[in-house]
Image (spheres, rainbow, N blue to C red):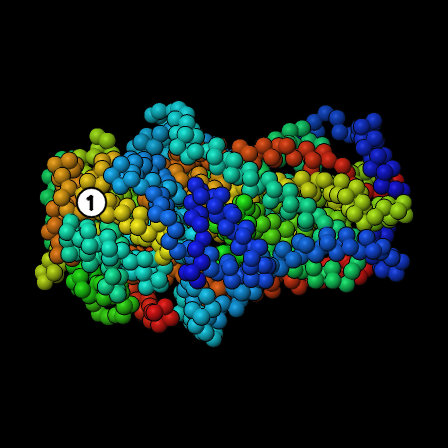
Amino acid sequence: MTAATFTGSRTAAEAAAPNPNRRRRLRPARAFLHVFLIATCIVWIAPVLYALYTSLRPYADTAKHGYVSVGGHYNLSNYTTAWNEADLPLYFKNSAIITIPALLITLWLASMVAFVVARHSFKFNLAMLMIFTAGNLLPQQAIITPLYKLYITIPLPGWLSDSGHLDDSFFGLILIHVAFQTGFCVFVLSNFMRTIPHEITEAARVDGASEWRQYWQVVLPLCRPALAALATLEFTWIYNDFFWATVLMQTGSNRPITAALNNLTGQFFTDNNLISAASMIVAIPTLVVFFALQKQFVSGLTLGANKG
Amino acid sequence: MTTFHSASSSSTHGLARRTVLKGAFAAAGVAALPTLAACSSSKSGGGEASTVVSFGSNAAVPEPKGAYQTLFAAAKKSTGLTIDVNWVDHNTFQQNITTYLQGNPQDVFNWFAGERMQYFAGQGLVSNVNDVWDKIGGSYTDAMKAQSKGSDGNYYFVPFDYYPWAVFYSKSLWASKGYQEPTNWDDFITLAKKMKSDNLIPLAFTDKDGWPAMGTFDYLNMRINGYQFHIDLMRTGQGWASSQVAAVFDQWKQLIPYYSPGFLGLTWQEGANQILNKQAGMMVLGLDQIGTIFTGSNADDLGFFAFPEINSTYGQDSVEAPIDGFMVAKSPKNSAGAGKLLEYLGTAAAQQLWLGSNPADIATASGVDTSKYTKPQTAAISLINSAKHLSQFMDRDTLPSFADPVMLPAIQKFLNSPSDAASILKNVDAQAKTIWATNG
Amino acid sequence: MNHLASITLSQPGRNRRLRRYTKRDRAALTLMGGVPLLLSLAFVWLPALATVALSFFNWTGIGGFSDMKPAGVNNYRIIFSIYPEFPPAIEHNLLWLLVFFVIPAPFGLFLAHQLNKQLRGSRIYQSILFLPVVLSLALVGFMTELVFSPTQGLVNNLTGHAGQHNLIDWLGNPSLNIWAVLIMACWRQTGYVMILFLAGLKSVDPSLQEAASLDGANEWQSFRHVVWPALRPINIVVVVVTVIESLRAFDIVYIINQGTNGLELLSTLITANIIGETSRIGFGSALATILLVISLAFVLPYVYTTFRKDTRS
């Protein structure tokens, strides 16, 4: 069975003849499951809703009445203050400049490595996998000192970096995200690629497809659920990173959105209600990415199955 | 290293620098890149006398940022210098100071007095500002001058604002209960007992973040053993196992029963709110912190008194008063401009302008129009003027590698189990010895 | 299923004998694997190995090689003899690992399995459960305060333990606060694990499950014999992710109290000694090296044996 007929028949079958079991009335087991899931979700979302509630109250009120209280003022003033004072549009732009290329390059590089190690059997595959997997083990703080020395030594042309070096440049920041996150993605993707039956690439090979075409046109499309899940996670991590951003980017106005949140924190005093409101705004892109990619791993192609 | 003159990297000169770099690349070739990199990483003074001074600010939060913007606008009028600011938030700036100063720091930057300043001076990461002090020296006290010098006797720091640590309280609460400010330890403890029987938390004390407790240690040590012992202990790391330090922790044990319940899980803001909401009687804190909680109509309700006397030899002769100010990077692009800017920032007029929006600090230069000060500011001045010695704060007076990594958890451990004081101090002593042995 | 697996896994062996690569293919494969490898070596492994080397020096992080003073194993000696934060840090990291294996990993799998059924509202459930993963550190830190602050927190106020006399100090009591933090950590980790499993479950053929249920298998049996074996590669991912996340755990603890007073973790000790003004680079690097060794001890043998089994069979 070839890749084309395999995937084709699956989706066609699903579209044409939905499983009769799926649309039947609610069984007691299902009802119980729903009750359980709803309860879990309430527990899960409660702290978020509570923070949301707090973000609608001015600091003076919660300082006076405590956080567990009702009354006082409720308004969006924390949101407008956050938007205006933290200069959010500028930092959203910076985050986009850093996160989008870093995410795409990471997934692209990682999927290529995963293709090499998971779909071939070279002697060094195991070593490669170990290098990429173990590269995730160290926390960022552990490698920052040598890395920083490296960054202020490697020159970059002026149009890429104001400092003339990798440090204090968008390029350098994207680079470290790519280098640091690729390992994890290689590890995850190579494991997912193992689940793709070898007949699929075998068929393509017989048809004379080059390795690149096998990667780009056969394997990569089949990895969509994994890529979507990874993209969601990686977007979140790169977007929320503040460690690389603060050490490797010295120019405050070039830092990503996490810096904008820090800019609302004083030397000693922190208006947590304001931070809460700003954090809600800052979380929106990650949620958008999640919703956009969710259907990829919820209703994406089903693969790895050998029907019949 | 310093012979390579790169064009100013300030954004206004982006084009010039680009061309220089391109040329340099072509000339040097790829093999020589590391050398080139090493050279250009330390930029020496830009060629033409620039009117732009770059400034690394740790005040990105709206409140002081606005005050600085006003100040820099005035500085431009007065000096003709345009100040190109890199705004960074306070914590990030502090966290990255070591890498910041080795990368491409701005000409002038915010920093603190004390060992924290001397350390970077000793490492050669900052320039001396002796020239500036020739001009501004007249408006500073000897105590301020001493706090601005490195251990080599050169000036490295220009003080700007400072604030005292003291025992704070709500005036209206005290008036309603008829409490009097204590001046010695016995009165202090008697008052705490009285407050407890009045169903108040006698001492709002909150140490989840670890650093607030250091202020109490500093005062106890200075009151019991005197300023000189305290500052030697901080600077040399010698004597943590001594009976004098043990006496400090013994004294401290007497206070713990009066502290806020759950104090290791509370932030200083929660503690200050206990004072604001009249749930607690007193709190050892800095004016700069508690001043941000007592705002608006509550501002005048904030009262304070000097930490009580314990040993009559030393009385109340020392005040903990952390000083904030400015330093100049190792190789500023505009050295002359940096000096000019600091001369301006060292004037009473500049400081008063900045303080206009910040009633929690006071100016360091003399000649400030004190009639414009708020009540707490005036009280802070008289508190500081009464003192013979100024200390900075534990995390400013001792080695950074000792304050937070060793003392902060050690004090928390003591507060958790006061009876373990002896073994905790023994360990602190052992760690101090290794840190000073390896760190200089 | 077994039939399929045997085909899949025997394939590489056959390839080795049969496959001939054209020059272009060989160049493509070299580039595809080589460029990312170089990046990883240069920007992750080079600094990591430098960190290991630095652990044998005393250095402030300022200046170059000439400013480093050889220290032998002195940094390690200090860590193991007089550094009181080290033993609790190891303990907490291992506790973290244990808890992550016992709670979020199975619970995340359970949720993913349930949500993979054609369930009404599945996407809403997924979104809510995933929400903690995407929130910024600042917000999660503040939520921890909101929930667990001894006087202001939701838990104590709802259970009547916020008063002066019966207060439960969730954040300040050094034997209690690690659990408050672990609750928040599990809250985040579950959604993370769930997403990985959800993506993984897409490789399980639903028709096999249907077949199993037609054969009279109950849900557990069909899970045990159909779903679980197919999830094997994803299980490897989850195991490794769990180890990584527990040993690298940092942010929630850091935002609560920078990792002191009962919340010590290896990562916070490294930070305390390396980041900021502290500059005890050699000492911090020694801590980092210990962390690296512990992580490798957990991950490498496991990954090595599973991968080898896969490539051999």
Is B69 displayed left or right of B195 in the figure?
A: right
Left or right of residue B113, residue A144 in this image: right
- Residue C219 visible in the current orientation: no
Residue A15, image x, y percentages: 80, 28
| Residue B51 picture location, percent across and down | 34, 43
Q: Nearer the viewer, residue B155 or A192?
A: B155
Residue that numbered label 1 is attached to: B347
Quarter-wise, where is residue A305 in the image? top right
Q: Residues within 10 Å of mark 1 (few under 14, many from 20)?
A: many
Q: Position of residue C23 (x, y in %)?
A: 83, 56
Q: Depth check: give the residue in front, C111 or A39.
A: C111
- Identified at 19% across, 47% down, the residue is B364
Does C192 appear above or below C83? above
Q: Is residue C119 visible?
A: yes
Amino acid type of the residue that numbered disc 1 sits on in the rendered structure? Thr
Label 1: chain letter = B
Q: Is residue B409 left or right of residue B4?
A: left
Which element type, helix, strand or loop, lies under badge 1?
A: loop
Q: Residue at x 80, y 45 (%)?
A: A213
